[in-house]
Amino acid sequence: MSELNIISEPSIRLLVFVTMLLAIATLEMLWPRRQLHLSKARRWLSNFSLSFVNTFLVAILIPVAGVTAAQMTAEKGWGLLNNFQTASWISLLAYLVIFDLIIYWQHRLYHRFNPLWRLHRVHHTDLDYDVTTGIRFHPLSIIISTAIKLCLIIVMGPPVIAVLISEILLNATSMFNHSNIKIPTKLDTVLRYFLVTPDMHRVHHSAEHTEHNKNFGFNFPWWDRIFSSYQTQPLTGHEKMQLGIEGYGEGQSVSLNTLLLQPFTKNPEESNPEAPR
């Protein structure tokens, strides 16, 4: 990747982000799946502020992540794919699949171990479900996730373009599968063979603990089926299902300051059998 392309890489990601955000937000207004209950202005301000903090901290603390790390591994000959003569398209597909598998298991670990769950819980305490839920993550959670992706890049040595595509896909699909778009049932059924749909992932945000330990996938839907963590629909239906985590009402789940401090406060009402105390 040339110097010009490196410089433009953040611009490419920003362009895709803004385009996807505007497109999904528009579709949410035209064809909403559920009625939203909280002030969209308050939620969006906090969720976008959290995303801004995450972007800033990662840029400061892990400056060699993503495309820069892939460049470094290529220059130094690090990683499995840099030491085997494989076609570029094979290396690209291999990285995209392995990357998504790692994200799936990382997600399950965030639900399994209490310190990680407390960080990830910030994402689950959103009481409404729309495109901004897909960018609502605690900064420490994002830093850990970025470090894991950095390790994967060093081990695999993927092409720079593969890393760029994986990051764009992860960001775009996260906004899509957290969206409040009403997709016809037949189309949703077909889409689930190829990607995680909003109805599929919304089950994961149910306040019912058995359901928020299902449907962990972000990009590809196959891992949940392969590893027996798939649930087709919520028991009470999408319109009636309760979102969030027990014990976290509007006062504990909307403001930016509350979200940043949330992992360091214990919720005695919470019931998550996969997260040890």
Image: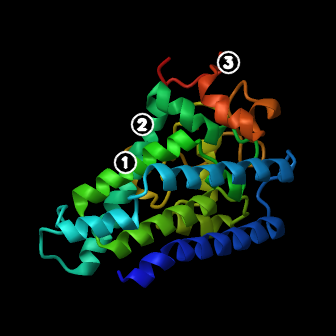
Closer to us: 166 or 235: 166
Return the disc, 2 or 1, that comes first in the chain's sequence. 2
Q: Residue at x 64, y 48 (%)?
A: 136
Mark 3 Cα-neighbour bin, 10 Å: few <14, some 14–19, many ≥20 = few
At label 1, which amino acid type do we have? Answer: Ile
Residue marked by disc 2:
109
Kindly state the secondary structure of the residue where label 1 is placed.
helix
Q: Amino acid at mark 3?
A: Glu
> Which quarter of the image is occupied by the N terminus?
bottom left
Q: From the viewer's perspective, is 193 left or right of 40?
A: left
SS at mark 2 in the image: helix
Residue at 62% from the left image edge and 19% from the top image edge: 266
Query: Compared with residue 91, is residue 42 higher up or lower down, i.e. above or below?
Result: above
Task: Pick whichever of labels 1 and 3 is earlier in the sequence.
Answer: 1
Q: Is residue 36 left or right of residue 22?
A: right
Q: Are marks 1 and 3 in contact (CB under 8 Å)?
A: no
Task: State which tag comes first along the sequence, 3 or 2.
Answer: 2
For the residues marked 3 and 2, what is the alpha-carbon distance in whole angstroms?
21 Å
Q: Can you tell which mark lies on residue 148?
A: 1
Rate crowding at label 1 as few (under 14), some (14 to 19) or many (20 or more) other CA atoms within 10 Å. Answer: some
Image location (x, y in percent) of residue 157: 24, 64
Quick check: 71 left or right of 266? Answer: left
Q: Gap between marks 1 and 3, in whole Å?
A: 31 Å
x, y percentage for residue 68? 37, 66
Q: Residue at x 46, y 58 (%)?
A: 221
- Residue at 18% across, 62% down: 78
Specify the amino acid type for callout 2: Leu
User: What is the distance, in whole Å, between disc 2 and disc 1 at their CAs?
Assistant: 12 Å
